[in-house]
Amino acid sequence: MSDFENNSSSETLSCGIDFLTGFWQEKYLQEYIPRGGSKIKFITGRPGSGKTHFLRLMTGLAREEHYKTVSFSANDIWMHDFRDIYVEILEQCNIMDCLEAASQCVIREMGYDPAEIPEGMKFIDYLSQNGAGDPVTRREIRSQLRRLFLDNPLLDNNFALACSMLTGSILGHPILEEQNRDLLLSWLKSDRTIKITQLRALGFYPSRITKYNARNTLRSLAEIIHMGGYSGLFVAIDDMEILASRTSLEVVHYTKMKREDTYESIRQLIDDIDSMHHIFFAYAFDRTLLDNENAGLKSYQALWMRIQNEIVGERFNRFSDMIDLDRLAAQEYSPEVIVAISENIARRRQNSEMMPLDTDEARKLAAQAHTGSFGIAQLIMDAMEVTQNV
């Protein structure tokens, strides 16, 4: 991650980059994903091209469009086992928050307004207080839970049953003891310390969540998220170039086997994405992952075959699933845009003596960006720091 990406504010790179972020917001976040589509995008570029900042911008836009958003670095989460990715997504999404929203669907379906229920009071207690907690109404709650979860063909059966029981505990019917609630949550989080036999007392006979079925479980989670009124799930994963790193000093170090398992996991996700709904994945990495023949994407033919056609073409294609930020900069970052970016940086660093670049300096940077080792974003920052120190 570059100094520019660490230090820039959420609006610093809005000039130029909104050519792409605005397009994604309209075509994907507002239209395609809420209507049931799912998508995987790859963002690449030289160091300092603004990849991390781009992910942050898109994550912020996804929140504005009422998505559940998840972001993490491949430096922190193992990528070769999709189970680990699923667990991280589940943790950041807060499954009980999602089920709380789903419980409000049940309340509305039964003709009540969730806003009228006092805070901290369960739905069944509210019904009893108003003389409506009779067996017929309780049966209707169970019927609504079955319709919402168990009869939903988009949900894995085990996932649906666990979510139905947890949502029932939120509503207050059927009653679920706290110990059993924690047990169900532990299973959803793929806690390997629990014994599957412990769940059988609940009439629940699941298998463990593993790297082989975690994509199916994630598909179910996305459906629960959408069920709760969210537009979808947005997942941003940064620093994927660590896969090609040769140093063993990294906290997360990939052997050849783990690296190939990661590529296979991504390949499977690409193949499965059309069967998923309301999910947007964005992976970001330095160009080394494209250029390294021995350890990069080209080293795993099954994955490379699925993405290589995304890299051709002279003009920048906003629909492409492989986004090259260097190519975007070359097309959209005119000297005038570069000056505007530098003005934003200078304005937001009020306590420093950084001065905006002039048009001549911007032209030199635009030319340098075509052949240099760093992206235009880092070059702007470096040039401004030199000006400050003069």
Image: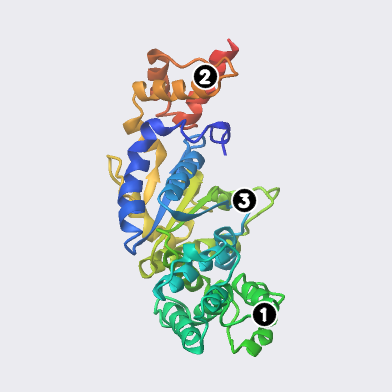
Residue at 44 percent across and 55 percent down: it is 67
Which residue type carries mark 3?
Asn
Q: Tell me the residue that label 3 is attached to.
A: 75
Q: Where is residue 145 in the image (x, y as percent from the top left)?
A: 47, 80
Q: Nearer the viewer, mark 3 or mark 1?
A: 1
Cα–Cα gap, marks 2 and 3: 29 Å
Q: Which residue is denoted by mark 2 in the rendering?
A: 384
Mark 2: amino acid: Met
Q: How crowded is mark 1: few (under 14 residues within 10 Å), some or many (20 or more)?
A: few
Q: Do the residues labelled 2 and 3 touch (CB within 8 Å)?
A: no
- Please name whichever residue, 368 or 199, is drawn nearer the observer in this view of the structure: 199
Cα distance in 3D space between marks 3 and 1: 38 Å
| Cα distance in 3D space between marks 1 and 2 | 61 Å
Q: Which residue is drawn at 32% across and 33% down?
A: 331
Residue type at tag 1: Glu
SS under mark 3: loop
Q: Name the residue under label 1.
A: 177
